[in-house]
């Protein structure tokens, strides 16, 4: 894995040899761990050229538009698999056979309920609080309800915590929504699929149980799959960093949720709808397209292009198909915001300015449209992202703990004052 070496020439000092590591796919990586012995370290804000860990879970090639989970293309998983099968894959490294899947699904369903006392925990939040604020609190609080399996050095404890988190996140997300609406919280139903159960808890009430549309359940399941993991992004890196301190899994996932809340990360699909509100009407599109092309204008088109993908986001192709299916199922044709979104999509796919810069509609653009069409409020979008991403977070957390690791401790380039002495208060100017 380290057959080649790089040599770093530092003026006035002896050359430093650094091993070059080779992964199964992707570029070679220069191992700079030994650089500290020379009295130097690297400076890389935003970790644009730094690998913080070794992982076998997810691989992204942004130039080619490739996303693999344990080697399987995301398009194949979205078309031929379902969310719980993808969860099993991320957690265990292989797709399950029929017996393994049945056992895993049964295990998840047996943990969908949350402690009844957790209901009272919600009363401490204002009803108009942002759902992500509530989600951070209740997920972090799970460690106070399920403290019987928090030994991170025990593989069985790690396994049960992983299953509990995957199972309970839809229940918690729906509880957050129901609390904000002032409606009764719905218990999970184990006769339904994972996605059907979530939609049941979101939209049904004790006085009216409506059947769940298979098309909407399939769309929800695909949204979960397409957001399940995305390599070492900000929230996943946060979970790993928190986990490196020995923190319990619920605290680590709560930290991931907090990082995901940022509009540059998980809030992107919420930002798409906010942008559509700002544009307001199809008649204003030309004005806002011109603003987006103007380097001196702060306006940005949200949901187009991606920091990682320099080609099309591979998730967006599947999400567009799903979007078309949902809009057809619901018969939505005259919604002004959706008409605006469709017109923006048309421009982005045909305008040379967008094509030359690979500013194609991304997964956030389509998922925002789908969630709005289903009837999920904008404030809940990032909560659903957190629900889906939990399995990715917990997979990375488990992977880190299953092999030797060190507590994360980034270095810094200090540019503050040098050492100086305190002067008496009366002498300070």
Image (tube, rainbow, N blue to C red):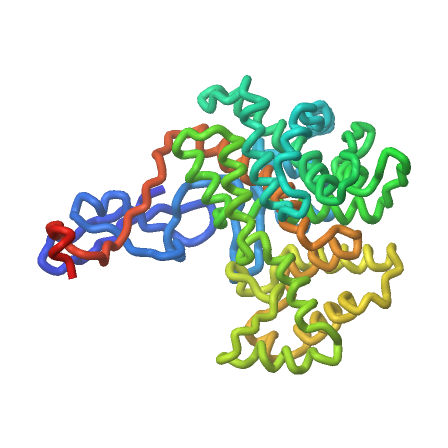
Q: How many marks?
A: 0
Q: At x 46% / y 44%, what residue is drawn?
A: 237
* Coordinates of residue 300 in the picture (x, y in percent): 57, 71
Residue at the farthest top position: 148
Instruction: Say above or below: 70 vs 402.
Output: below
The residue lying toward the viewer, choosing from 341 and 308, is 341
Instruction: Say above or below: 76 vs 153.
Output: below
Q: Quadrant of the N terminus?
A: top left
Q: At x 89% / y 37%, what residue is drawn?
A: 209
Q: Is residue 390 left or right of residue 21?
A: right
Q: Is residue 323 left or right of residue 256?
A: right
* Coordinates of residue 281 in the picture (x, y in percent): 74, 75
Splitting the image into 4 quarters, where does residue 205 fall? top right
Q: At x 61% / y 41%, what residue is drawn?
A: 134
Q: Quadrant of the C terminus?
A: bottom left
Q: At x 49% / y 80%, what residue is drawn?
A: 296
């Amino acid at each position: 894995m380290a057959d080649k070496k790089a040599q770093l020439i530092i003026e006035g000092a002896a050359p430093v040899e650094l091993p070059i590591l080779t992964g199964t796919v992707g570029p070679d990586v220069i191992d700079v761990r030994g650089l500290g012995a020379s009295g130097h370290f690297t400076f890389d804000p935003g970790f644009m050229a730094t690998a913080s860990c070794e992982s076998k879970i997810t691989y992204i090639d942004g130039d080619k538009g490739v996303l693999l989970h344990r080697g399987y293309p995301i398009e194949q998983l979205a078309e031929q698999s379902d969310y719980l099968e993808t969860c099993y894959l991320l957690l265990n490294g292989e797709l399950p056979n029929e017996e393994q899947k049945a056992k895993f699904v049964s295990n998840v369903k047996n943990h969908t309920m949350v402690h009844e006392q957790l209901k009272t925990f919600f009363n401490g939040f204002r009803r108009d609080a942002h759902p992500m604020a509530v989600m951070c609190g209740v997920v972090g609080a799970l460690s106070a309800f399920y403290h019987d399996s928090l030994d991170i050095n025990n593989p069985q404890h790690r396994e049960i915590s992983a299953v509990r988190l995957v199972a309970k996140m839809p229940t918690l997300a729906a509880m957050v929504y129901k609390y904000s609406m002032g409606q009764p919280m719905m218990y999970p139903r184990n006769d339904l699929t994972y996605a059907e159960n979530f939609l049941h808890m979101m939209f049904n009430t004790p006085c009216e149980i409506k059947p769940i549309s298979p098309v909407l359940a399939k769309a929800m399941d695909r949204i979960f799959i397409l957001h399940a993991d995305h390599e070492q992004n900000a929230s996943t890196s946060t979970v790993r960093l928190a986990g490196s301190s020995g923190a319990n899994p619920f605290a680590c996932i709560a930290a991931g949720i907090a990082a995901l809340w940022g509009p540059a990360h998980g809030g992107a699909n919420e930002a798409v709808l906010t942008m559509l509100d700002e544009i307001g009407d199809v008649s204003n599109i030309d004005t806002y397209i011109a603003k987006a092309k103007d380097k001196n204008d702060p306006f940005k088109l949200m949901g187009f292009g991606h920091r990682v993908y320099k080609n099309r986001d591979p998730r967006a192709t599947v999400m567009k198909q799903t979007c078309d299916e949902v809009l057809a199922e619901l018969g939505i044709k005259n919604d002004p915001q959706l008409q605006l979104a469709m017109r923006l999509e048309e421009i982005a796919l045909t305008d040379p300015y967008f094509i030359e810069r690979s500013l194609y509609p991304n997964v956030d653009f389509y998922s925002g449209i789908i969630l709005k069409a289903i009837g999920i409020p904008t404030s809940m979008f990032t909560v659903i992202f957190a629900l889906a991403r939990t399995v990715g977070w917990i997979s990375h957390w488990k992977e880190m703990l299953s092999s030797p690791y060190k507590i994360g401790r980034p270095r810094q380039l200090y540019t503050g004052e040098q050492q100086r002495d305190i002067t008496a208060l009366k002498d300070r100017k």
